[in-house]
Amino acid sequence: MDAMIVMRGASKLYGEFQAVHPLDLTVGRGEVFGFLGPNGAGKTTTIKMLGGIMRPSAGQITVAGIDMMADPVSAKQRIGYIPDRPYLYEKLTAFEFLRFIAGVFDVPKDTFEKRAAVLAERFGIGNWMDALIEGFSHGMKQRLVLVAALIHQPELIIVDEPMVGLDPKGARLVKNMFREQAAGGGTVFLSTHSLEVAEEVCDRIAIIQDGRLRALGTMAELRRQAGAEADLETVFLSLTGDVDHQEAIRGLKEKEGD
Amino acid sequence: MPCRQNPVLERLERLERLEMLGLLIPEIVSQRNRFRKADKSERFKYYLFFGGILAFWVGLFFLFRYVLGLFIEVEVFGTYLVKKLLSVLLLALFSMLCFSNLISALSSYFLSEDLQLIHSLPVTMREIHLARFVLTFVNSSWMMVIFGLPVFLAYGVVYHAGADYYLVMLLFLFPFLAIPTGVGVSLATILVNLFPARRTKELMVVVSAMFLVTLFLMLRIVQPERLVNAESFSDIMVFLGQLKTPSATFMPSHWGTEVLMPLLTHEVGEPWYYLALMTLTAAAAIIISGWTNLLLYSGGWTRTQQSASSKERHRGVFDRVLRGVTSGFPRVVQEMITKDVKMFLRDAAEWPQLLLILALIALYLYSIKVLPLEGPFITMRIHNLVSFMNLAMVGFVVSSVAVRFLFTSVSREGRAFWLLRSAPLDPRTFLLGKYLVGLPVLTVLGLVLVVSSNLLLHVHGPLMVFGACTMVMLSLSMAGLSVGIGAMYPNFKAENVTKIAAGPGGILFMVVAQLFVATVLLFEAVPVYLLVRADYRQRPLHAWEWGVIAASGVLVVAINAAGTIVPMRKGAVALRDLE
């Protein structure tokens, strides 16, 4: 497998708290990779290390063969990063914002205008390009972030909670975009709480808990690891040791049914 | 084991039974938690803040006691001047209260983030109105209490007023503060039904900034320093007499004067009549704000929710000009400069600060102009000395502007900073962009102040050139210091830029900047002395003098280069390692 992401013993320490234990992970080109875990498991920290937003305390991360610590600028040039909360420059218009991002990623000016027009139409913000971002809804901002992440045609898309704030049409658009990225030889690394999304679009899934990798593989492999021929929810709860929790929820549901 | 209830919470819960106050509990508890959960350094900041207020309070009291003491000793005009001063002060305070209440009401009734939650609670519109009215009243009035009370106390002390004055002073404060709140709330409710709430608030911020600028300029033109000179009282009286302040007898500021003055001077008056008038007006303002709220609030609130401001901005001339000016820079730097300038000019909380800078320049130059530097014993040497010392003062002004605009420039990226951290952007390039946006502002400001001051001081020749060169170098290093230290102490979560500038990093920058200016001027003192001496004796410089000047010049350039580069590099490393 031609590797897009290679993590070797990458870990993160906040003071004395080990948020991510040494992590070894390889994600190939053409893959949609799901990163799952309960709240506080270390998903966002891992994603931030991958995106070059945060330096690991130890270990090595390479993106498309480039060492993120040694040459972060070149590594980030290949990444499109989409956070869960779209904080943007509210006093810029959508067009100005995209032009700024294109400038930072050094996209040629004429190429930028063509790409921006196509992507904006595709993500349904074509009519809002000259409006200030401060007037956008959460979903609109999320769509704009998606366009911004794609404007330089990244080899790797890193996305934290991709469906937050999107309507069903937007969600479908994003899922298609993920599959197209993978089909074109690119990679998508997504962190999500939505097991449905992971099950629907991911080729492989990793489950992290307490900063440690608990499971890794395709859906079929995870089912085998969990010892259950069930959906991803059951597999997830089983692998993260939350079966009791699940039973408690079932108990409550039965009570409500009474 | 049952958790022991906190006594403060118990008291608050008892208050909660009064439903109107219940809606204020989150605000009260948040403030209390903010203080109780603060760590040592934060608590120190609180103590520093309250200590500062206390010091200001005491200082203001003694200043007014001194000024009023001078006033009442003036024969014939004394009482008149004191009364005029009081009416001017009350009018200024009342006007500021009106602006502040209107802005505060727009926030607390229509723009606050917690309103979504408040509206989902099982409470009536009347209760929401009352809770928000109290919030607006408190938010807008606390500053007035800090500014006003020491002044009123100074009046009482100077006139040896009896208990009735202090009692009436307290009684007078409530209606004086409540009238603008009632007016502000009513006006805000009406305006939101006509215009978008956010735009109205932005406009009001601009108008109030301009009002403040005008007020400061007027106060400076009075030349309060002349108060120590009894001969100039007649001029001041002429000036005060020209102010048409209390002619409007329907203004609460006029009523306030009529309430307080008779109790101070024991002259014939109708203080109780005017106090009753104020109280009744306050009651009417509160009731009218309630009616306005009842009739118009729902419509206004709905409009606020609907009117997502999607103001269109066309890609016009300004954009092309900005890009033309920055075309010599690498593209990423050009984009950063364009972004920062546009965001600054579109933010109504930011660009009015430029008006304040203009006012600052005007005030500074006016103060230089009225310096007592004319007379038989004032030589050109003194002018030269003042010109040299003026560099330190201009350095202070430039660093004050730098802390507000350049030091905060990294933090102003706010929560959108993730965009730059995830982008292929070297932190050094990022800081260079910030540096280049701020540098022209500091350089122009510094040069205007130094060159104009020297012209006013009749300082020409080598000292003029020397002052201008020093200022250019200091601007370069002040920009580097402020951007660099700003990157070392970023605060991406602060909603208010002023808070960032007043934080520990801002204070550190101000201290470092003053030490830096002092060091530069120390190394320049000898060459300046040599230059001035040669000029005074009208002879060319000796070779050794040139040597000293050149050596000092190299040293000063090196210090300024270090002052620019070292903090910028340290700032870039701090940003790279940011968690």
Image: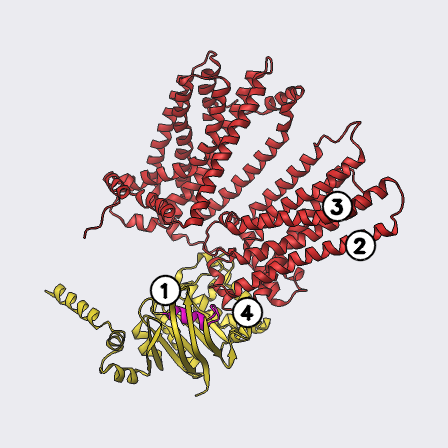
Q: Earlier in the sequence, mark 2 or mark 3?
A: 3
Residue B342's x, y, as percent?
57, 56
**Chain letter tied to red:** B
Q: Residues within 10 Å of mark 4 (few under 14, many from 20)?
A: many
**Camera-side mark, 3 or 4:** 3
Residue ID for mark 3: B525
Residue B460's x, y, as percent?
80, 42
**Chain letter tied to yellow:** A
Residue ID for mark 2: B550
SS category of the residue bearing label 1: loop
Q: Is residue B337 visible?
A: no
Viewer-closest of B96 and B227: B227
Label 4 and label 2 in one chain: no
Label 1 and label 2 in one chain: no
Viewer-closest of B88 and B59: B59
Residue ID for mark 1: A165
Residue ID for mark 4: A102
SS category of the residue bearing label 3: helix
| Quarter of the rendering occupied by the N terminus of chain A | bottom left
Label 1 and label 4 in one chain: yes
Instruction: Chain letter for mark 4, please.
Output: A
**Camera-side mark, 3 or 1:** 3
